[in-house]
Amino acid sequence: MKENSIVILDFGSQYNQLIARRVREMGVYAEVVPYFEPLENIIARKPKGIILSGGPASVYLEGAPTIDKAIYDLGIPVLGICYGMQLTTQLLGGVVERADKQEFGKAELVIDHKNSPFYEAIPNLNQVWMSHGDHVTKMAPGFEQIAHTDSCIAAAADYSRNIFCVQYHPEVTHSVYGTQMLKNFVFEIAKCEKNWSMGNYIEQTVKSIKEKVGDKKVLLGLSGGVDSSVAAMLIHKAIGDQLICIFVDTGLLRKDEAKNVMEVYGKHFHMNIKCVDAEARFLEKLKGVSDPESKRKIIGHEFIEVFNEEATKLTDVEFLAQGTIYPDVIESQSVKGPSVTIKSHHNVGGLPEDLKFQLLEPLRELFKDEVRAVGREMGIPDYMIDRHPFPGPGLGIRILGDVDKEKADILREADAIFIEELRNADLYQKVSQAFVVLLPVKSVGVMGDERTYEYTAVLRSADTIDFMTATWSRLPYEFLDKVSNRIINEVKGINRLTYDISSKPPATIEWE
């Protein structure tokens, strides 16, 4: 599958993962690598095509990201997008300058070469998405303009070397025929074949795990989340009971989480799972702690301690499996440099190196939607595979202020009602992430003829494509009314409910 691939060189574009996803959705393997990847490594991958992504830099400034221009002489078709177009132009003898009229947003594309393979089956006038302050003022020798907007050379091609460049972003949905343009490059120009499928991936990964692990044992921290569960399924299919899963019940999980995990993966799929009840231990460590970062660190540290203790009880374990997925890999090799830490990552990780295991990461080449597709193909029930993201620290960061068992139990019940009603109303799959937050605020209420003084809770539901930005879900008033009535009537400890109508940014999806 990988020798029939597209390699994407990342120059820091916010859309680089989107390019890869678009290509994979066509049934072709695509891989994102940093722009400074050595040329010999790119050649060794035997790609059918190379895409140069966009990026925030200006090619004419000192220190701007660049590549070995021998890449254009490999005989491999190249597509330069935005910065990729400007870099190609600069390296091959053209001129790039600051634009008098910068373009950000929708633009009308006029196709000049109607018979260009890149524009096959695309109307002569169509909408594309621009995002640039620089543009090409003189094309490199051998290139000709194949499309324009009213302010720039929008596309150019060197047909003799199969090099195509576009100033706009075909990978975003605002470029109406963008996916078709990418398809034309992948199939008509790069001559790729469709052979990337989750069925093939399962077959090849299971075979690879068998060969790598042999008769040794593998240890995996099973959280019940999508990534760790699908990783466990793949490894279990390959080596059966040689896989040992440790499930740590922190006391901060969703309602009936431990029971569901043991029933689905232990009972139904016959996995070897050790369930550790560590609720009292976690809550003791969290007693009186209200600072969000402190809570995260305590929960993360304690998880590692519990996992480590259980791991040292085992013998002949040589591999540690993790549910690392492809966006994690891309971000770890990001060309953008360090960014400001807004808060520690939601997922608990960082297992100590002294565990002395070889790492096994069967999902490290998959995007989240592909992970879900693998899970479905392997028979994981929809209600487990389609669940919204759940942070590693769990309810510990959805209970604002200090954490105790009473609050965790109250929040568990309220959250279960919210999710149940979203499913009943066929809304669960229409929103991206929904949950309840418990505030360290009590207010007066009246229930029956009695005065109450109980907690305030917040419903949070967000809609997003990539979780980088999000808007609050426009849930129907009738639905919110029903959820409010149920939670206030059924959950002892909550007498007031509010709905969070803040977007990301400036807010984050999680409250802590």
Image: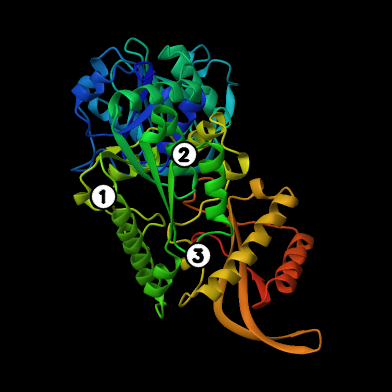
Cα separation, mark 3 vs mark 2, equals 26 Å
Sequence-wise, the earlier of marks 2 and 1 is: 2
Cα separation, mark 2 vs mark 1, equals 41 Å
Residue placed under numbered mark 3 in the picture: 395
Give the percent coordinates (x, y) of residue 357: 24, 42
Q: Secondary structure at mark 3?
A: helix
Residue 1 in which image quadrant = top left
254 lies left or right of 221: right
Q: Which amino acid is tagged 3? A: Leu
Cα separation, mark 1 vs mark 3, equals 31 Å
Give the percent coordinates (x, y) of residue 174: 56, 38
Residue placed under numbered mark 2 in the picture: 271
Residue placed under numbered mark 1 in the picture: 337
Disc tally is 3
Name the residue located 55 percent from the left edge and 54 percent from the top edge: 257
Q: Secondary structure at mark 1?
A: loop
* Nearer to me, 481 or 316: 316
Give the color scheme: rainbow, by chain, secondary structure or one colour.
rainbow
Sequence-wise, the earlier of marks 1 and 3 is: 1
Name the residue located 61 percent from the left edge and 79 percent from the top edge: 455
